[in-house]
Amino acid sequence: MLSLLCALTLVTRTLAIVGAQVGADGITNLFGNSFGLPGTNATDDYIVIGGGTAGNAIAARLALANHSVAVVETGTFYEIVNSNRTQVPGYDFYSALNSVGSNKGQSLTEFALETEPQVGYNGRKVVYVAGQTFGGSSASNYMGYARATFGTFDKWTKLTGDDFWTWDNVFPAYKKSCHFTPPNYQKIDRKANISYDAGAFDSTGGPLEVSYGNYQGPYGPYFDEAMERAGIPRREGLNSGTLLGYATITAAIDPETATRSSETSFLQLASRNSNIKIYPQTLAKRIIFDEQKRATGVEVRTNSVTNSFTYHLSATKEVILSAGVWHSPQLLMVSGIGPAETLQKHGISVVNDLPGVGQNEWDQPWMELSFKVNVTTGSQLQAGNEEVSAKLVEQYLTNQTGLLASIGGGQALAFEKFPQLYHQQFSNKTRKFLDTFPDDLSEVNYLSLEYGDNPPGLGPDDNYITLGSALSTTSSRGNITIKSADMADGPIISPNWLLDQGDQEQAIAALQRIREIAFNSTIVQSEYRPGSNVTSREDILEWLKENMSLIYHGASTCKMGPKADKSTVVDSRSRVLGVEGLRVVDASALPFLPPGFPMATVYMLAEKISESILEGN
Ligand SMILES: Cc1cc2nc3c(=O)[nH]c(=O)nc-3n(C[C@H](O)[C@H](O)[C@H](O)COP(=O)(O)OP(=O)(O)OC[C@H]3O[C@@H](n4cnc5c(N)ncnc54)[C@H](O)[C@@H]3O)c2cc1C
Ligand SMILES: *[C@@H]1O[C@H](CO)[C@@H](O)[C@H](O)[C@H]1NC(C)=O
Ligand SMILES: *[C@@H]1O[C@H](CO)[C@@H](O)[C@H](O)[C@H]1NC(C)=O
Ligand SMILES: *[C@@H]1O[C@H](CO)[C@@H](O)[C@H](O)[C@H]1NC(C)=O
Ligand SMILES: *[C@@H]1O[C@H](CO)[C@@H](O)[C@H](O)[C@H]1NC(C)=O
Ligand SMILES: *[C@@H]1O[C@H](CO)[C@@H](O)[C@H](O)[C@H]1NC(C)=O
Ligand SMILES: *[C@@H]1O[C@H](CO)[C@@H](O)[C@H](O)[C@H]1NC(C)=O
Ligand SMILES: *[C@@H]1O[C@H](CO)[C@@H](O)[C@H](O)[C@H]1NC(C)=O
Ligand SMILES: *[C@@H]1O[C@H](CO)[C@@H](O)[C@H](O)[C@H]1NC(C)=O
Ligand SMILES: *[C@@H]1O[C@H](CO)[C@@H](O)[C@H](O)[C@H]1NC(C)=O
Ligand SMILES: *[C@@H]1O[C@H](CO)[C@@H](O)[C@H](O)[C@H]1NC(C)=O
Ligand SMILES: *[C@@H]1O[C@H](CO)[C@@H](O)[C@H](O)[C@H]1NC(C)=O
């Protein structure tokens, strides 16, 4: 035992990676002491359900403070089951880009949840990807890192009545979670001229790595120019509490290795330096409550292809639920917390009747317009051009640069309120609704991507670009409910995109605005999607209903809020109402969907709640 521990320490100190130590050739080492023993009941201070974005962060903070922590994750390490697709940033389009439809649901690192038919999308069912691996959705996502705004936290503080959430109190937590590396112009073309807010970061922050990757596509400066012409001002980065404007997006990439920063951050830090116990391939089936409605543990099942063990993990302090926007409310429901009527229908005994569980889902309908351009983009890589791909692989492996070393987009990521002219065209109802949001909160964002919708028969010199747009201030709310009392059955989900007519007005405006930006750029030669024949409001709306999809930013299905609000699920410290010893800490617990991109705020939430727990609150 002693020699094993020594070897463990020695190896891990030297190579600085535990749990899964990965070389360029794939997985090379696993260390048993970081793992729980499947099939054996065990007791820890805390059990964290879901080794995803928030789960790993909160588990790590508690474990590093010398608490014993078990992390239960239904997936395993993406380094093992997804070849190099998760690690190499430039392969993100396989999981994150809707246009690459054929890949959906074919990865072992994702749940491929299918929505109910979406009325606002002409009755289509859409695949909603969610990470199913250590790292969770941070291992599927585009890695874009952008924080929320001052106004967001004024609203959050007012809603909860808790000063814990003022900007001054959350800014340090945003900083604490990550370590920033400025652009490296040895690798990135100087023409990218990236401006950034260095004061948004702290040199002692981490372990999440945030950077610009080691590449910015040549299209970038042209779109910067187009933004300016369209009246969107340049910003010094998107991480200091203001968003209206454009900047190059920061991304969760470790620039030294040019790999995705995901489970490699918090989980591996804790594996190296604490007694965290990891349970891969382990599904949390039910949270167990005692007579006093205190969460005392979790019934779990660990699976291999031929074996499965069901057993109990006990928590002496708390159970923390971090299973994500769809599975956290599902697990609450199957464990007896949720709308009583629904639970009874499935024979689940009611621990607490909380009608808000699974309701109030905020999401962002997303559109992708595709334009032909006369600079080189990722079209050839995406289309599988072997010569181009081989060159990019060589560049990546030799110098950790080139298209594969970045997220393939995000330059000129812009946030805005629709310009005055557009507001004037909205109905009074829509205008009134939009007026309810803080002054600094964006209504819409625009994201440029190297990848996208290429026409069939792409020539070897043809290059396309995507200008996408997500609507932030929609009024339709989605929901999730259960099919059965068993977590092995997926949830029934309905994001309800474009259900409201006001949301449709905003979608039309976003499409028109994208065109305005695109045709202010000198590199755009023609519009491929939707095409120059789609111009009337009716045709635009029809195209949108047929073609809009999602950007996977769902939140608030177990919303934080005031206790007087019947749809509140957790209090201002993420404690589930009406029971003891149970918190929800993930995107589902956000009071509403913050602007920016959610990942940064999900990490911040995990930092804040661990701070609260460690302070005894
Ligand atoms: C394709 C895609 C692209 C995105 N792009 C961006 C982006 O560029 N920038 C950005 O900021 N955000 C992006 N997002 C959103 C962002 O990634 C999420 O908001 C965030 O990661 C959510 O974190 P979470 O902790 O709530 O859940 P997750 O990170 O999804 O973690 C939930 C974890 O729980 C596990 N789990 C679920 N049920 C159980 C169970 N019963 N037992 C055990 N484990 C369970 C899951 O396997 C998963 O690991 C994207 C998301 C996706 C899917
Ligand atoms: C955790 O325990 C170690 C070893 O006993 C000790 O060195 C360290 O200071 C402790 N950390 C905290 C945060 O209490
Ligand atoms: C870079 O951007 C700044 C604005 O942030 C601008 O003042 C400067 O002229 C730009 N430099 C180049 C070389 O384009
Ligand atoms: C460029 O943007 C401006 C301001 O938004 C707009 O009026 C103009 O029509 C756009 N130009 C083109 C060619 O679309
Ligand atoms: C594991 O815990 C469960 C629930 O407390 C109990 O029913 C079961 O007997 C335990 N198994 C063993 C082997 O102790
Ligand atoms: C990723 O793996 C594939 C095989 O699955 C290989 O062809 C490709 O060269 C690898 N890419 C990099 C950047 O190593
Ligand atoms: C790597 O960088 C060096 C130095 O800039 C350069 O000479 C070499 O061509 C690059 N190799 C590849 C494969 O890009
Ligand atoms: C919208 O509101 C304005 C006043 O703000 C009013 O004059 C107008 O009649 C309203 N339009 C409709 C269609 O209600
Ligand atoms: C979800 O929303 C849809 C559309 O409003 C509605 O038809 C459905 O009943 C809702 N489901 C639940 C569980 O709330
Ligand atoms: C792209 O086309 C425009 C005209 O549409 C031209 O002015 C510009 O020089 C071209 N750029 C490149 C890089 O070829
Ligand atoms: C636009 O043209 C495309 C391709 O020719 C066609 O499929 C589509 O139906 C047309 N749309 C409209 C609104 O005319
Ligand atoms: C987009 O709409 C067109 C009709 O305009 C349709 O042919 C196409 O299949 C749609 N694409 C998607 C992804 O729904």
Image (cartoon, helix red, strand yellow):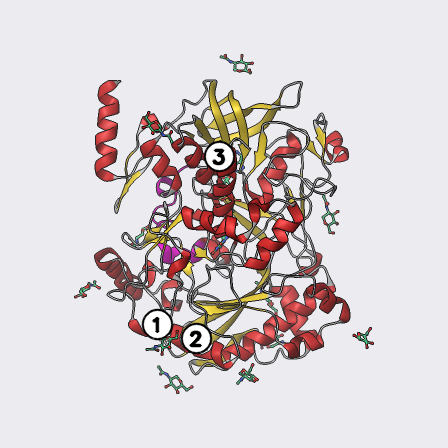
Q: Secondary structure at mark 3?
A: loop
Q: Earlier in the sequence, mark 1 or mark 2?
A: 1
**114 vs 185, nearest the viewer:** 185
Q: CA distance from mark 2 to mark 3?
A: 42 Å
Q: Is residue 577 visible?
A: yes
In depth, the one of 589 and 111 nearer the eye is 589
Image quadrant occupied by the C terminus: top right
In percent of width and height, residue 326 lies at 59, 43
| Local crowd size for mark 2, using a 10 Å CA cut-off: few (<14), some (14–19), many (≥20) | many
Marking on residue 224? 2
Magenta span of residues: 76-94
Q: Point out residue 410 in the picture as x, y percentages from the top left corner.
A: 44, 65
Q: Position of residue 431 (x, y in %)?
A: 72, 69
Check mark 1 vs ligand 3: CB closer than 8 Å? yes or no: yes
The quarter in which the N terminus is drawn is top left
**Residue sitting at 76 percent across and 70 percent down?**
428
80 inside magenta stretch? yes
Residue corresponding to mark 1? 193
